[in-house]
Each structure stands twice: as structure tokens, then as C-alpha cells.
Amino acid sequence: MANVLITRLVSGEEIIANVTEGEGTLTLKDPAVLLPTPEGKLMFAKWLPYADIEGGITLDSKHVLFTVPAQKELEDHYTTVIVGGLFVPPTKSVINPADLKLTV
């Protein structure tokens, strides 16, 4: 990957993606959110897995706090898992909240 960056959004999300900068915009291709685990490790989850963003998603720079290069090890893992297609999205359909029952 040519330009794998970690982007911190004003919402607090940290997204790793192949980033292309435009005039006042950032385009994120193959974005994945970085999630810390209780064990102190990081986990990837595809960002907006339910959306068709095959060509990338463009954000206005006003929604971005900063971008930083990913560490080489993290970049390699991202490239293998997310870009390389090892990530397997869940096959279960979306849960309808009306079908959930509260039990005590």
C-alpha cells in the first residue's frame, strides 16, 4: 500500500485506510476501524461494512483531527487482512430489534 494512514475523526474513531488527500478532503479506500481489546491489543473491523464503498469514501477535512502513518507491522497486517481479503464478514443477517425479547 502506498499511503496507509491512521485517521482520527472528530467522532473519536480511528480509521486505518489507504488515504488520498484532495483539496479540503480525504478519500479513504478499504477503511477499517481500529478497536482496542481488553487484552491491550488492536482489532480491525471493516468500517461501514454494510455500505458499497468499493472505490473509497471521501470525507471533508473538517471531520478529521489528524492523520499519522501506521507502524509497519500494523500496515502489513492491515494489508493482509483487510486489503488482501482475509477478513470474513459475518454471514448472519441484520437483527431486527422488534424480534428481540428482554429477559430478566
Image (tube, grey):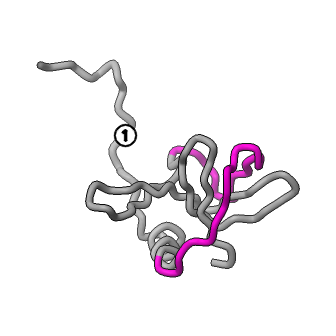
Q: In which quarter of the image is the C terminus?
A: top left
Residue sitting at 56 percent across and 62 percent down? 16
Left or right of residue 100: residue 33: right
Residue sitting at the far left: 104
Locate residue 99, reporting x and y percent: 29, 22
Q: Is residue 42 left or right of residue 85?
A: left
The magenta stretch spans which residues? 50-73
Q: Mark 1 points at which residue?
A: 93
Residue at (69, 52) in percent of width and height? 57
Which quarter of the picture shows residue 10? top right
**Within the image, what quadrant is residue 100 found in?**
top left
Q: Residue at x 42, y 64 (%)?
A: 87
Q: Height in image: 23 above or below 100? A: below
- Secondary structure under tag 1 reads loop
How far across and down, in percent of the image, does residue 15 sit? 56, 56
In magenta stretch: residue 57: yes
Residue 35 lies left or right of residue 102; in this view the side is: right
Q: Nearer the viewer, residue 65 or 7?
A: 65
Image quadrant containing the N terminus: bottom right
Measured as percent of width and height from the top left, residue 17 is found at: 60, 64
Above or below, comparing residue 32 to residue 74 in the picture? above
The total of numbered circles placed on residues is: 1
Q: Residue at x 66, y 61 (%)?
A: 67
User: For residue 29: magenta?
Assistant: no
